[in-house]
């Protein structure tokens, strides 16, 4: 049995990945709004850090790329891990770890603090999980599967 699937449906990966990336973005925005922008600005000022005008664009683009990677990894691993939310969550967590290893290096070099890192990456973990589960569901959806029989089996 191979660890990775040899047949991956590229259009479905793209579609599921864009959905996952959009959900990562929505969760990221919602969690930052939940934390309220003014206290977050105060945290950045307290840590002597400043934001860039390109940061929102970068985060949105990085989330879309991460969503496509989650969908591709899910498609590659589902033959081994099985289908569904569990495999989607595993693909999301692996992607999250890979995406944020470099960000942890910024803490190690003193460019940012653990607090800022934890707030940024913790909120994104929620988005990655939501995106991974939704992307897995969309990838596995077959055309016409939403039409269920009223009673009994399909004929």
Image (tube, rainbow, N blue to C red):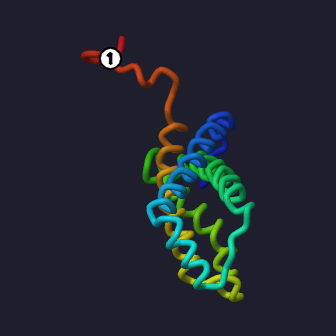
Helix, strand or loop at label 1? It is loop
Residue 143: x percent and y percent? 52, 23
Query: Is residue 1 among the parts visible in the rendering?
Result: no
Q: How many marks?
A: 1
Kindly give the residue lying farthest to the left in the view shown. 151
Q: Is residue 58 visible?
A: yes
Query: Could you tell me which residue is drawn at 66 percent across and 50 percent down?
Result: 64
Q: Is residue 60 left or right of residue 85?
A: right
The image shows residue 69 at horizontal and vertical percentages of: 65, 52
Q: Quadrant of the C terminus?
A: top left
Outermost residue toward the top in this view: 155
20 vs 97: above or below:
above
In the image, residue 108 sits, relative to residue 86, either above or below, namely below
- Residue drawn at x 30%, y 18% is 153
Who is closer to the viewer here, 61 or 92?
61
Identify whether 49 is placed above or below 28.
Answer: below
Q: Is residue 86 left or right of residue 64?
A: left
Mark 1 closeness class: few <14, some 14–19, many ≥20 residues within 10 Å: few
Which residue: 47% across, 20% down?
Answer: 144
Q: Which residue is mark 1?
A: 149
* x and y percentages locating residue 10 in the rendered image: 69, 37
What percent of the width, then of the height, locates residue 132?
52, 51
């Amino acid at each position: 049995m191979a660890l990775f699937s040899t047949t991956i449906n590229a259009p479905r990966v793209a579609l599921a990945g864009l959905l996952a990336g959009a959900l990562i973005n929505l969760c990221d925005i919602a969690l930052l709004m939940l934390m309220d922008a003014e206290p977050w600005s105060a945290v950045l000022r307290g840590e002597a850090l400043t934001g860039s005008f390109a940061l929102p664009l970068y985060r949105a683009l990085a989330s879309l790329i991460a969503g496509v990677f989650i969908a591709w990894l899910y498609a590659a691993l589902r033959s081994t891990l099985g289908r569904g939310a569990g495999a989607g969550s595993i693909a999301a967590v692996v992607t999250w770890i890979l995406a944020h290893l470099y960000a942890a290096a910024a803490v190690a070099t003193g460019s940012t603090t653990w607090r800022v890192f934890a707030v940024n990456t913790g909120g994104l973990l929620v988005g990655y999980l939501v995106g991974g589960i939704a992307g897995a569901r969309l990838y596995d959806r077959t055309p016409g599967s939403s039409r269920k029989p009223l009673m009994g089996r399909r004929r």
